[in-house]
Image (cartoon, rainbow, N blue to C red):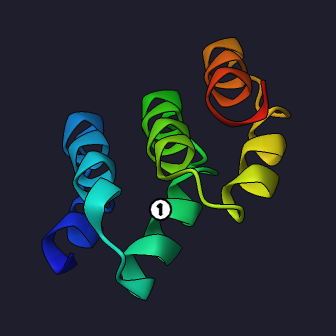
């Protein structure tokens, strides 16, 4: 989990995206918090999209408000992904 969280601070967006994907199976609270933060990454839409995918596939009841919030993202692909995974 620590390596995945560190990857979220890497300057390479591909490494950040891989870090988000690596958090998919982590039930660790720090991993969950990092995943939620990745949903709002200020620069890389790909990081946000992967975070939406991971959160949606985890599909717990707490994912619904996070996916609803993702609908406000200016990146159209993230909006579609959020709607498809958890809301639709």
Q: Position of residue 80 (x, y in %)?
A: 69, 16
Image side of residue 49 versus residue 88, left or right: left
Position of residue 39 relative to residue 33, above or below, is above
Q: Look at the picture and state if 88 lies above or below 16.
A: above
Total marks placed:
1
Which residue is more in the foreground, 85 or 40?
85
Q: Is residue 46 left or right of residue 71?
A: left
Q: Look at the numbered disc 1 and give the secondary structure of its residue.
A: helix
Splitting the image into 4 quarters, where does residue 61 fall?
bottom right
Q: Residue at x 57, y 63 (%)?
A: 36
Direction bottom: furthest residue: 29
Please tell me whether residue 31 is drawn above or below residue 48 in the rendered image. Answer: below
Q: Residue beneath label 1, please?
A: 35
- The crowding category of the residue bearing disc 1, from other C-alpha atoms within 10 Å (few below 14, some 14 to 19, many at least 20), is many
Please state, as top left, top right, bottom left or bottom right, where the C terminus lies in the image.
Answer: top right
- From the top left corner, tell me how far across and down residue 71 is, in percent: 81, 32
Q: Extreme left residue here? A: 3
Residue positioned 62% across, 14% down in the render? 77
Q: Quadrant of the N terminus?
A: bottom left
Q: Against 83, is 66 above or below?
A: below
Residue drawn where x is 56% and y is 42% of the image: 56
Percent from the top left, x then y, of residue 23?
Answer: 30, 60
Front residue of 45/63: it is 63
Position of 74 with respect to 48 (left or right) is: right
Residue 62 in which image quadrant:
bottom right
Please name the residue shown 44% across and 29% down the image: 46
């Amino acid at each position: 989990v620590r390596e995945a969280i560190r990857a979220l601070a890497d300057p390479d967006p591909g490494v950040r995206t891989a870090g988000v994907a690596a958090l998919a199976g982590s039930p660790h609270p720090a991993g969950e918090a990092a995943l939620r933060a990745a949903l709002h990454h200020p620069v890389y839409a790909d990081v946000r999209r992967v975070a939406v995918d991971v959160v949606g596939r985890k599909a717990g009841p707490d994912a619904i408000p996070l996916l609803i919030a993702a609908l406000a993202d200016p990146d159209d692909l993230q909006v579609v992904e959020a709607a498809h995974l958890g809301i639709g």
